[in-house]
Image (cartoon, helix red, strand yellow):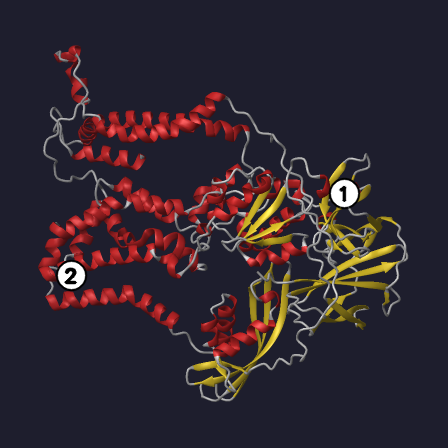
């Protein structure tokens, strides 16, 4: 608004008014300019005052709320603040696409603006242009300071695209029947000018169509989800009395929230967050936690580990990436809805109270916030219907002595005068204009110069495009392209990087790739890749040369990071370097279908409700016993020792004493010397949550400052005691125990050891992600608990190898313990310690 008002005021400086002087001195010229701009300056000031007052009145409730309840959200990373040179994808999304075809007119806008009275708009346009570049230059951070880490800078680019539209209109008007039209007709002819105008129109239409259809060939959001089945499930059996969470919904999570009365701890408006678990973490939304890496998964872990704290009972998952984390945290699948969304449930979650606490605001603020924004929007449109009016001449202003103020406040314009010397920078622009005047040169020279200019401007772009579409074929580039295509499931393109041998067609290659299974198949993303030890035999540019390389892969999952090293051979073909692949012969046992004894447990026909339950639906809680528990600490960094690196863990062992299976939740509470609670947390994946009758499981409750829900690491010196609580409900879900193992303890050179496992699947379904729990014992019970996941699936009647380290963490120290009793079934390590192994697995949903 300010640049527009300033431009209109400056435009009045070149419009003569009756009664102005005609002196040539500097003082006379300044007085004449002031006399000319006073009417617009008066009206502009009055308009600005009324606009600011209206703005203050409309947003006053928001300002009062922000002052009483200030926002404490930490900075959330955003692509508009990145360096667009090192992150070209962000530059395309937040800079190139918003500018679209108007970016072509930017140089013209600066020239036209700074060479005339429109320089305030041109200066604002240039400032918005620079601010919209984010972290590409240090200027935005220097200007915005602390606001740089809060604002999304693509807003400046959006404002710039609006501010440049008048200059776009000037450029097109000049090209149709202005100075540019005359220049093009004189130098290139009318047909060339019409072709350029047609090309400009085609460019604008093509860019608009490409941007509007960008999501059809590059997805930014999940496919459209029918929320009808979800709404039906929420209304069934009073499921709306519990909170829910969505995963993999994208922006559609807001549409679901708007159509149901059930509440969710996640949200689409960051300034309204009040949960410390969200305000202290740099994540945008929990539903897309995987896109923010470790911080996002860590924040999601808080909610799935302690769902009772948030009354969170249901999770609607549209992304299988999160399934392993939910399963090993104690959640189970209820089934898949008609729209393909999986429902996950956690047992023993209390419903929301009838009345939730809320901050009451004054009635007048609520009325203002509910009516004024819409009223201001309507009033702005209705103001266009008002008739034009001029400031009336009052009776006492008609007298000669007081006629001067009336003339100052009225604008009786004469024809505009020619630009004068009040624009000092024009003396630098005129020589440039004379230099660019090519009318004196022959047509051939003008065409040659135009072609050279186009080559200089478009040559680097064409060269970059050719390099992107024709990359140089090297073994490293081939391996990078292959694993990138596999990671993004572009299997046809990945097969194009293979030189198949022995008749390996694409269908057989896909079959071999799917047989491996495991965490890679839909549950992992490739986080990093390094090509190591490339050995080339022969001339790299000669067909028939071969090479071999070791590829180190790091997979990012919702559980942990997996690392593996894969050896691959390559061969030089006429199409470039390709990976050598052969059919993998999977030797299967002849007896594929076997009979296996099973136990069916009673499941009451109870339904989820907060009303009075039927007597036959009430089940007693299973009996549990904590056999041993101890509070230990260790240091994350063996070199640096300090409170900020110390982590506290409660380790122990639990047994189900009941004759029915139990869905168990183990909670550890840390207390001060006066008995007050410091923090609490639940055991997540370092235990088995579904226990068979009489089954035991080790457990570990980790306090890492993230899942414990505290802002800073816990000082071990303040912890005086700890409590362990175990509760359970009867369940009949996820009780399969199809993995058995042979274990062989091994020593290694670092005065430690490891247990080598051979996991065998004796069941009839594939163990997609095997999980092994290793419990180390001493004379007082469980000493330490470790977990390990298998990277590959274990098919029926097959085996896989897995190793688990038996080393204690650095600076391991027992702070407090409750003694337990020894149990049978322990195995001996080479150093005399004892250990037990517990196996269970996550199976892919069969529905």
Circle 1/circle 2 CB separation < 8 Å: no
Quarter of the C terminus within the rendering: bottom right
Q: Which residue lies at the image location 60% right of the left edge and 75% below the top edge?
A: 566
User: Residue 304 or 336: which is nearer the viewer?
Assistant: 336
Residue 521 in view of the camera: yes
Sequence-first tag of 1 and 2 = 2
Q: Is residue 676 above or below residue 315?
A: above
Report, in whole angstroms, how far the alpha carbon at label 1 lies from the one at label 2.
77 Å
* Depth order, front residue of 455/316: 316
Q: Is residue 74 visible?
A: no
Q: Where residue 812 appears, x then y in whole percent? A: 80, 56
Residue 195 numbered mark, or none: 2
Location of residue 614 (image quadrant): top right
> Count the marks: how many?
2
Is residue 821 rendered to the left or right of residue 748?
Answer: right
Residue 128, picture quadrant:
top left
Name the element at disc 2.
helix
Q: Helix, strand or loop at disc 1?
A: strand
Relative image position of residue 232 (x, y in whole percent) = 52, 44
Q: Is residue 421 above or below residue 491?
A: above
Neighbourhood count class around disc 1 (C-alpha, 10 Å): few under 14, some 14–19, many 20 upward: some
Above/below status of 237 relative to 782 = above
The quadrant of the image that shows the N terminus is top left
Q: Quadrant of residue 696?
A: bottom right
How far from the left and from the top, in percent, is residue 324?
63, 58
Number of residues whose C-alpha sits closer than 10 Å to that of mark 2, classed few (under 14), some (14–19) or many (20 or more): few
Disc assigned to residue 669 = 1
């Amino acid at each position: 608004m300010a640049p527009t008002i300033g431009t209109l005021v400056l435009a009045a400086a070149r419009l003569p008014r009756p009664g102005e002087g005609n002196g040539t001195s500097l003082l006379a010229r300044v007085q004449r300019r002031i006399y000319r701009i006073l009417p617009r300056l008066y009206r502009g000031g009055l308009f600005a005052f009324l606009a600011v007052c209206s703005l203050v009145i409309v947003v006053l409730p928001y300002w009062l709320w922000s002052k009483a309840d200030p926002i404490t959200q930490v900075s959330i990373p955003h692509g508009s603040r990145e360096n667009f040179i090192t992150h070209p994808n962000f530059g395309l999304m937040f800079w190139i696409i918003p500018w679209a075809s108007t970016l072509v007119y930017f140089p013209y806008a600066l020239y036209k603006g700074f060479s005339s009275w429109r320089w305030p708009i041109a200066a604002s346009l240039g400032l918005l242009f620079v601010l919209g570049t984010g972290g590409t230059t240090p200027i935005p951070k220097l200007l915005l300071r602390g606001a740089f880490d809060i604002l999304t800078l693509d807003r400046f680019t959006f404002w710039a695209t609006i501010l440049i539209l008048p200059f776009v209109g000037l450029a097109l008007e000049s090209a149709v029947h202005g100075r540019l039209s005359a220049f093009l007709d004189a130098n290139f002819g009318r047909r060339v000018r019409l072709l350029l105008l047609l090309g400009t129109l085609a460019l604008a239409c093509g860019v608009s169509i490409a941007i509007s259809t960008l999501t059809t060939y590059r997805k930014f959001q999940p496919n459209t989800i029918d929320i009808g089945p979800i709404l039906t499930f929420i209304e069934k059996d009073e499921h709306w009395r519990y909170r829910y969470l969505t995963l993999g919904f994208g922006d559609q999570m807001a549409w679901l929230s708007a159509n149901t009365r059930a509440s969710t701890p996640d949200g689409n408006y960051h300034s309204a967050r009040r949960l410390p678990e969200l305000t202290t973490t740099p994540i945008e939304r929990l539903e897309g936690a995987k896109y923010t890496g470790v911080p996002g998964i860590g924040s999601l872990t808080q909610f799935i580990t302690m769902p009772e704290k948030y009354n969170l009972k249901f999770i609607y998952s549209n992304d299988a990436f999160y399934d392993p984390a939910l399963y090993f945290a104690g959640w189970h699948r209820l089934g898949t809805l008609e729209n393909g969304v999986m429902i996950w449930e956690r047992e023993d979650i209390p419903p929301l109270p009838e009345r939730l606490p809320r901050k009451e605001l004054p009635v007048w603020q609520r009325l203002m916030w509910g009516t004024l924004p819409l009223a201001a929007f309507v009033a702005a449109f209705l103001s266009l219907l008002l008739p034009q009016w001029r400031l009336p001449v009052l009776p006492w202003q008609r007298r000669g002595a007081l006629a001067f103020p009336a003339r100052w406040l009225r604008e009786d314009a004469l024809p505009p005068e020619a630009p004068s010397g009040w624009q000092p920078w024009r003396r630098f622009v005129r020589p440039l204009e004379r230099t660019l005047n090519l009318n004196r040169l022959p047509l051939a020279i003008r065409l040659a110069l135009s072609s050279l200019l186009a080559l200089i401007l478009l040559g680097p772009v064409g060269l970059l495009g050719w390099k992107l579409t024709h990359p140089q074929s090297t073994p490293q580039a081939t391996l990078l392209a292959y694993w990138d295509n596999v990671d993004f499931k572009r299997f046809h393109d990945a097969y194009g990087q293979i030189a198949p041998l022995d008749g390996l067609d694409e269908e057989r290659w896909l079959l071999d790739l799917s047989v491996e299974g495991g965490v890679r198949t839909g549950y992992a993303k490739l986080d990093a890749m390094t090509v190591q030890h490339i050995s080339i035999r022969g001339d790299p540019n000669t067909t028939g040369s071969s090479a071999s390389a070791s590829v180190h892969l790091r997979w990012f999952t919702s559980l942990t990071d997996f690392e593996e090293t894969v050896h691959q051979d390559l061969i030089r073909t006429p199409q470039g370097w390709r990976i050598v692949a052969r059919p993998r012969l999977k030797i299967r046992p002849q007896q594929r279908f076997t009979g296996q004894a099973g136990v069916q447990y009673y499941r009451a026909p109870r339904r989820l409700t907060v009303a009075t339950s039927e007597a036959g639906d009430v089940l007693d809680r299973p009996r549990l016993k904590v056999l041993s528990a101890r509070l230990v600490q260790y240091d994350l960094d063996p070199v640096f020792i300090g409170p900020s690196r110390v982590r506290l863990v409660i380790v122990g062992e639990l047994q189900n004493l009941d004759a029915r299976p139990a869905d168990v939740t183990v909670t550890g509470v840390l207390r001060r010397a006066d008995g007050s609670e410091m923090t609490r947390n639940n055991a997540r994946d370092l235990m088995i949550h579904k226990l068979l009758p009489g089954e035991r499981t080790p457990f570990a409750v980790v306090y890492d400052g993230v899942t414990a829900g505290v802002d800073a690491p816990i000082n071990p010196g303040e912890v005086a005691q700890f409590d362990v609580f175990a509760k359970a409900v009867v369940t009949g879900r996820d009780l399969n125990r199809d993995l058995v193992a042979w274990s062989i303890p091994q020593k290694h050179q670092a005065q430690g050891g490891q247990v080598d496992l051979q996991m065998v699947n004796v069941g009839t379904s594939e163990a997609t992600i095997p999980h092994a729990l290793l419990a180390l014992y001493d004379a007082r019970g469980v000493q330490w608990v470790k977990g390990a996941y298998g990277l590959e699936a274990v098919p029926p009647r097959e085996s896989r190898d897995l190793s688990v380290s038996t080393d204690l963490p650095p600076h391991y120290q027992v702070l407090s313990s409750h003694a337990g009793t020894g149990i049978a079934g322990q195995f001996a390590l080479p150093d005399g310690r004892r250990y037990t192994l517990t196996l269970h697995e996550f199976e892919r949903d069969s529905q």
